[in-house]
Image: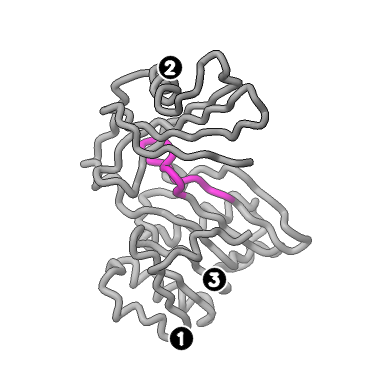
Amino acid sequence: MRLFLLLLMGTLVFSSPAIALAASEEVPKDAKRALHRLKKESGDTLTVHWDPKANTPSLLAGNLSKPSKHSPQWIAYEFLNQNKAVYGLSNARTDMKATEVNRLSDDTIQVRLQHLLYKTPVWNDGLVVQMNERGVVLRVEGRIYRDLKKRTLNRPMHPSFSETKAVELALAASNMDKAKLGGFSVEMYYHPSIPGTPLIYAVNLRSADPDEPKQQILIHALSKRIIEQKTIIE
């Protein structure tokens, strides 16, 4: 499955043979070196879509690795560790969490990975690594924001209020009657596209009325400010 992130405006596209990375000032030097190495190792099959907002690739495609008989998760982690400079990762096994493995066909397997910061998920940040039956990585796509630890001064954040309070704030913002609440979920994330990469609560509210759509409210976990509110139609 292709991620919608590839359709984002402003994505830079580099393809073999030259990749054109030298002309792009947005691409960090260590990432350029890693991409040129990967281009060579891929037999000149590498294609790169560069996301200037995240400052990492939204897509790598080509013959990206050698065959492997290891598990799909192991192959995905090994590939990301070998190319961690491309994504600004410290260690793929601590910075990424494999959340799902899917077999798309007899010859296509994909591993979905969630980006973590201080063991906490990063909002809408992750990758899908796709490989064939021989264990050759063919595509890596998604969005990973670079150097988030630097943005947070290498210090994890801590919420100033509880999940229960987050639900109360979400109910107030949504104008949903608590008596009509059919269910809810609360998760904590770092939000990479907001200055300072704040810690947030993502609260999903479901009405007892099945005809009512679910509501999602993002709340700043320190200031209690409502960051975003939207309706989710399933």
Q: Mark 1 = which residue? A: 17
> Which residue extends farthest right?
106
Q: Which mark is residue 61?
A: 3
**Image point (42%, 45%), residue name:** 95
The number of numbered badges drawn on the structure is 3
In the picture, measured across the screen, residue 18 lies left or right of residue 181, that is: left
Q: Residue 150: x and y, percent?
A: 24, 47
| Front-lying residue, 66 or 193 | 193
Q: Residue 191: x and y, percent?
A: 36, 42
**First reached walking from the N terminus: tag 1 or tag 3:** 1
Image quarter (top left, top right, bottom left or bottom right) of the C terminus? top right
Q: Residue 43: x and y, percent?
A: 53, 81
Q: Is residue 120 magenta?
A: yes
Amino acid type assigned to the residue bearing label 1 in the image: Pro
Q: CA distance from mark 1 to mark 3?
A: 13 Å
Check the image and report above or below for 105 versus 19: above
State which mark lies toward you, 1 or 2. 2
Image quarter (top left, top right, bottom left or bottom right) of the N terminus? bottom right
- Secondary structure beneath dot 2 equals helix
Q: Residue 8: x and y, percent?
A: 45, 64
**Image point (56%, 19%), residue name:** 181
Q: Mark 2 = which residue? A: 164
Q: Which residues are magenta?
A: 112-125
| Front-lying residue, 31 or 23 | 23
| Front-lying residue, 74 or 15 | 15
Q: CA distance from mark 1 to mark 2?
A: 54 Å
In the picture, measured across the screen, residue 102 lies left or right of residue 4, that is: right
**Image point (68%, 57%), residue name:** 109
Q: CA distance from mark 2 to mark 3?
A: 44 Å
